[in-house]
Image: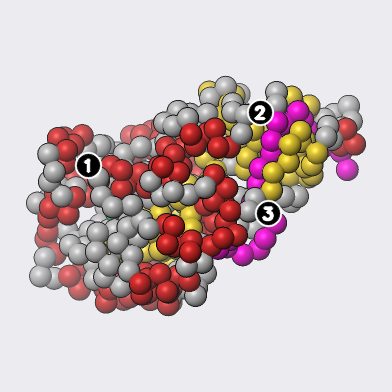
Amino acid sequence: MKADLLVHNIGVLITPPDVTHPIRGKAMDKIIEIENAYLAVKDGRFLAHGKGQGKAFIDERTRVVDAGGKLVTPGLVDSHTHVVHGGSREFEFEQKMRGVPYLDILKSGGGIHASVKMTREMQDDVLYAQSKKSLDKMLAFGVTTVEGKSGYGLERDTEIKQLTVQKQLDENHPVDIVSTFLGAHALPKAYEGNRDVFLDAIIAILPEVKEKSLAEFVDIFCEDGAFSVEESRRMLEAAQAQGFKLKIHADEVVALGGTPLAAELGAYSADHLMAIDDDGLRALATHDTIANVLPSTSFNLRSEYAPVRTMIERNLAVAISSDYNPGSSPSENYQFALNLAAIHLRLSPNEILTAATHNAAWSIDRADRVGRIAPGLQADFVIFDAPNWPYVLYHFAINHTQDVYKNGRLVIQNQQPIWEGTNHETD
Ligand code: NIG
Ligand code: FE
């Protein structure tokens, strides 16, 4: 079969190996590396790749691209973001820099509550425009699939508004968005003393979310000052009974037991895990729930980093995400999260690639479509203006992408979006 697109003169092509399970522990350090490689694409999917020029895949209709000896990776997967939200919180930044803890700001009515107010007040089209701008940035950083959560409404109308905007973006923007309902992100002040009434109200939104296909996952913030393990169980079991897949924000500040709960319920991921304890480590070692770590959040909160070396020793499967949100991680720069994974989590370049592609795809149930360069998978890939992958991690806080391809289509060229105006079709 001939290719529609043939990329040749690739200095080095890297990808996680062909596996149909999360990659755990030591195996995270093993990737496939092909020097002087080609990559063939047909109908938006990978057709073949290997050493050499790939001449066998070329005919007169094939578009041939010279990668100039540079690095090619699978499209990156950012599997935990809060990309759709109204406004920003720079007014809290000074307070935070003076050392006021994240949970204290939340308790005093700021933090998530401040973003809830802004998101509630924002018109749909303004919310769409703000979120689109973020997705443009993410794509330019080489991210071709993201997960995005609601959770800045905490009531029906705004939660549905956030998810609807997110769905429209998924349809109109090259980045694929996997959607998560996070109605239980914080307890509104009005419900203090009436926690069950709030949870009932959030659970009551689920059928509409399902019916309108607005989210595939349900998540909850299981934390001191947010929701208890019992409340998390109630929320997640209700969601599971309605056919939602599960995620949890757990062990960000305190290990309450949210991580073992996630494993028990078969959640796809437990996220944050800076304060994970032995029970949590044991639970994730024996289940397919991915340990999704968010180093940009640790950086921004000046808090602990998740104990990822221990996780790998204990045979966990780890993913890395940006957690892009207006409070604890106000940056769309996924490559920076990967820099931090090298510097602070002490992951090897190979482990980071696994965590940023295949395992991240697993945590959002997309490993059958994205996260690797393998025949039949979506032709999402990045040409980095770098000689090798360690260089991208070492030369930090810089965008190293050159070109980004989504479903075999060039969408970012020399770091600039080229999909708009020329071609409005969705993927
Ligand atoms: O993942 N921890 C809870 N939720 C977000 C922060 C949201 C915010 O501060 O607006 C997080 O860090
Ligand atoms: Fe988060």
* Span colored in magenta: 1-24
| Coordinates of residue 334 in the picture (x, y in percent) | 45, 40
Examine the rendered structure and indicate whether residue 386 appears above or below residue 240: above
**Numbered badge on residue 17:** 3
Q: Quadrant of the C terminus?
A: top right
Q: Earlier in the sequence, mark 1 or mark 3?
A: 3
Q: Secondary structure at mark 2?
A: loop
| Coordinates of residue 293 in the picture (x, y in percent) | 40, 54
- The CA span between labels 1 and 2 is 43 Å
- Marks 1 and 2: which is nearer the front? 2
Quadrant in the picture for residue 311: bottom left
Q: Residue at x 70, y 56 (%)?
A: 18
Disc 1 packing (10 Å; few <14; some 14–19; many ≥20): some
Return the residue at label 2: 70
- The CA span between labels 3 and 2 is 20 Å
Residue 177 in magenta?
no
Query: Is residue 173 in sight in this rendering?
Result: no
Examine the rendered structure and indicate whether residue 235 appears above or below residue 131: below
Q: Residue at x 25, y 50 (%)?
A: 303
Q: Secondary structure at mark 3?
A: loop
Quadrant in the picture for residue 219: bottom left
- The CA span between labels 1 and 3 is 44 Å
Query: Is residue 39 in sight in this rendering?
Result: yes
Return the residue at label 1: 118
